Image (spheres, rainbow, N blue to C red):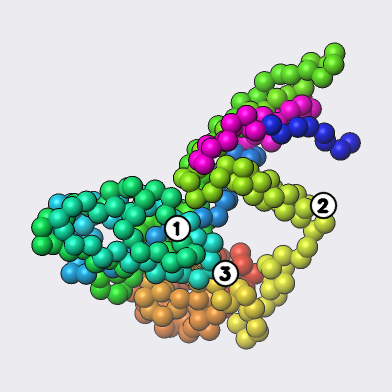
Amino acid sequence: MEPTFDIKQEKLEDNYGKFIISPLLGGYGYTMGQALKRVLLTSIPGAAIQTVRIEGVKHQFSTLKGMKEDVLDFLLNLKQVRVSYTGEKAVKLELNVKGPGEVKASQIKTSGSVSISNPDLVLANLAKGSKLEVEMEVVTGVGYSSAEERPSDTIGEIALDAIFSPVTRVNYKVEETRVGRVTNYDKLTLEIWTDGTIDPESALVKASKTLMSYFGQVVAPKASKTDSVAQLGPDDSLGLTGKLSVEEIGLPTRVANALVKSGYDTVEKLVKADKNDLIKVRNLGEKSLKVIKAALIEKGVEFNNA
């Protein structure tokens, strides 16, 4: 039976929306509410500042002459900048300010494809005669990316924790409603708060499409990438799997970092590596090789070095 219900926008603002979905068959209020809440909070794509370079600063525990805040405090403020960007490639932003006065997010130089939804955010306070020169890299993504997962060997380049999700909070409530004389229908009230880089209605539509794509795979299954490379060995073409970075195959952070620093940053390079060379890598051993083998098998790739 095809579902028939109405979606009413009870309140809609730039960063808040309240929607009422009714009438739903008994139980479907909780089914839809919980599913939409999870997808809204974890799977809506967004953009964030990923790396920062500050002129005259080598690491995050430094101080900058003429800036009231420590560099660490400035970086924490910078993490709160909410960026709207939908491009696939990383984009550079710049901040060049001279004191005295407050430094706000609105002073960040952006391109036509990038905008900032909280321009009044205060980033720092500069004294007279001081200056702040910053270069930032913005990327798109989903969910959360820890700075520890993206270590950099470049002096002066500081990785930031990246919060991509543009949805900041979701709340839902299910109440009984009636259709004619039947009273066991559900009314779902869904509230969505965003950071201003996306409006709540668009977020709700994207979340619904994401759920449809997952259920669509149940209705009409398509061959997964894992199935297509399940029988591949180190001498075969690894396809897209070979291009995956070692951070993307579920390895412990310590193991992934050790491999990256030694030049084995992709699955393709890892599979072709000699066992004796891998054992010589700092922080790796026989136990680590077994962990690597298990992670590769999960991706459908044979690893004969362990």
User: How far across and down, in percent of the image, does residue 264 sit?
Assistant: 45, 78
Relative to residue 140, is residue 302 depicted above or below?
A: below
129 or 236, which is in the foreground? 129
Q: Which residue is drawn at 76% across and 26% down?
A: 23
Magenta part of the chain: 9-34
User: How far across and down, in percent of the image, does residue 305 sit?
Assistant: 52, 78
For residue 90, which numbered disc appears in the image?
none
Q: Please say whether residue 86 is visible from this viewpoint.
A: yes
Q: Name the residue under label 1.
A: 115
The kind of residue on which mark 2 rests is Val
Of helix, strand and loop, which one carries label 2?
helix
Does 209 sit left or right of 65 as displayed?
A: right
Q: Residue at x 50, y 81 (%)?
A: 269
52 or 30, which is in the foreground? 52
Does 173 sit left or right of 252 as displayed?
A: right
Of helix, strand and loop, which one carries label 1?
strand
Q: Please say whether residue 305 is visible from this viewpoint.
A: no
Q: Name the residue under label 3.
A: 296
Of helix, strand and loop, which one carries label 3?
helix
